[in-house]
Image (cartoon, rainbow, N blue to C red):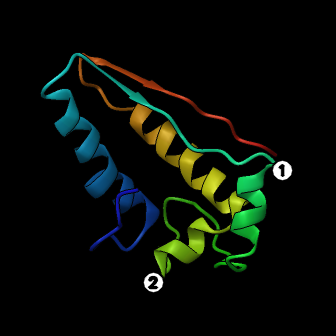
Amino acid sequence: MLRPSAAKTFFYYAQKAFSPYILSQLEHVSRVNVVWDEYFPKGLKTETCSKRGKGVHRRVEPSSVIPGNWPELLRIEDKKAELFFFLATSVAALNTGKKIISTCNMHT
């Protein structure tokens, strides 16, 4: 996962960190596949993640401020799913002339 570095909001994270990374990968290939990690409710990985702590509850919206402790946000499966959905939507809007294939599964 790309760290947010100087990005203060999720919008700027998508625009200044994530999208530029995808575009840099497209300089060398004609297609990029973006596959998001997903833990299923009764899986071993979900149980392992739940033991690591509760994490930071922050709504993933373009204007929302990114929490200072990035890994804390990623500990909450719902928040991680929101982030992945947000980034998948952002990358789908890129106009590159090349193919970007992205999985996207938003549970409600």
Q: Position of residue 76 (x, y in %)?
A: 69, 66
Name the residue beneath numbered marker 1: 41
Disc nearer the start of the sequence (1/2): 1
The Cα–Cα distance between marks 1 and 2, rounded to whole angstroms, is 27 Å
In the displayed orientation, state which residue is furthest to the left.
27
Task: Describe the element under mark 2 as helix, strand or loop.
Answer: loop
In the displayed orientation, state which residue is furthest to the right.
42
Q: Position of residue 88 (x, y in %)?
A: 50, 38
> How many residues crowd mark 1 within 10 Å: few (<14), some (14–19), many (20+)?
few
In the foreground, 13 or 77: 77
Name the residue beneath numbered marker 2: 68
Vertical comparison of 102 with 82: above or below: above
Residue at 80% in and 49% down = 43
Q: Quadrant of residue 6?
A: bottom left
Identify the amino acid type marked 1: Pro
> How many residues crowd mark 2 within 10 Å: few (<14), some (14–19), many (20+)?
few
Residue at 74% in and 75% down = 51
Q: Quadrant of the N terminus?
A: bottom left
Q: Which mark is residue 29?
A: none
Identify the amino acid type marked 2: Gly
**Residue 32 appears in the picture as rendered:** yes
Residue at 13% in and 25% down = 28
